[in-house]
Image (cartoon, rainbow, N blue to C red):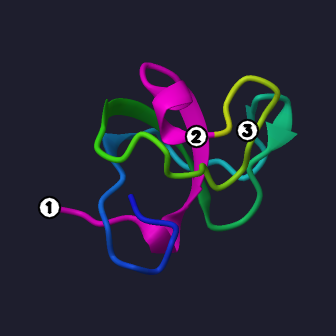
Amino acid sequence: MDISGRKQVVAKGRVHPVDPDQKVHNVRLGANVARVWVDIVKIDDATVWRASDEIDYMRDSLGSSIAWPMDKFVIY
């Protein structure tokens, strides 16, 4: 997952089935956005794409689900 454009992998996780009407932290995902469970954080202070009351940085998202734009996935 990379949001900065620097092609850095900031975390590793699992993508859930994509449904634009699904909500993550009470916000609808929308088009071209997926719900991701964060399993490993690589860069603690990287900001998340869509912050919430409890999650601002990748370190806050470990073991939780966050919204992430699908064009920012690095698949390997």
Image depth: mark 1 or mark 2 in front? 2
- Please, is residue 63 above or below residue 52 in the view? above
Residue 38: % across, % down:
40, 33
Mark 1 and mark 2: span between their CA atoms? 23 Å
Q: Residues within 10 Å of mark 1 (few under 14, many from 20)?
A: few
Mark 3 and mark 2: span between their CA atoms? 22 Å
Tell me which numbered mark, 1 or 2, is placed earlier along the sequence. 2
Name the mark on residue 76: 1
Tell me which numbered mark, 1 or 3, is placed earlier along the sequence. 3
In which quadrant of the rendered image does the C terminus lie? bottom left
Image depth: mark 3 or mark 2 in front? 2
Residue that label 3 marks:
22
- Please, is residue 26 above or below residue 35 in the view? above
- Please, is residue 68 above or below residue 67 in the view? below
Name the mark on residue 24: none
The kind of residue on which mark 2 rests is: Tyr
Q: Mark 1: which secondary structure?
A: loop
Tell me which numbered mark, 3 or 2, is placed earlier along the sequence. 3
Mark 1 and mark 3: span between their CA atoms? 25 Å
Q: Residue at point 65% right, 48% down?
A: 19
Q: Mark 2: which secondary structure?
A: loop
The kind of residue on which mark 3 rests is: Gln
Residue 12: % across, % down:
29, 43
Taking the image as shown, residue 28 lies to the left or right of residue 57, namely right
Q: Mark 3: which secondary structure?
A: loop
Quadrant location of residue 41?
Answer: top left
Instruction: Give the magenta range.
Output: 57-76
Quadrant location of residue 49?
Answer: bottom right
Residue that label 2 marks:
57
Taking the image as shown, residue 24 lies to the left or right of residue 9, namely right
Q: Residue at point 67% right, 38% down?
A: 56
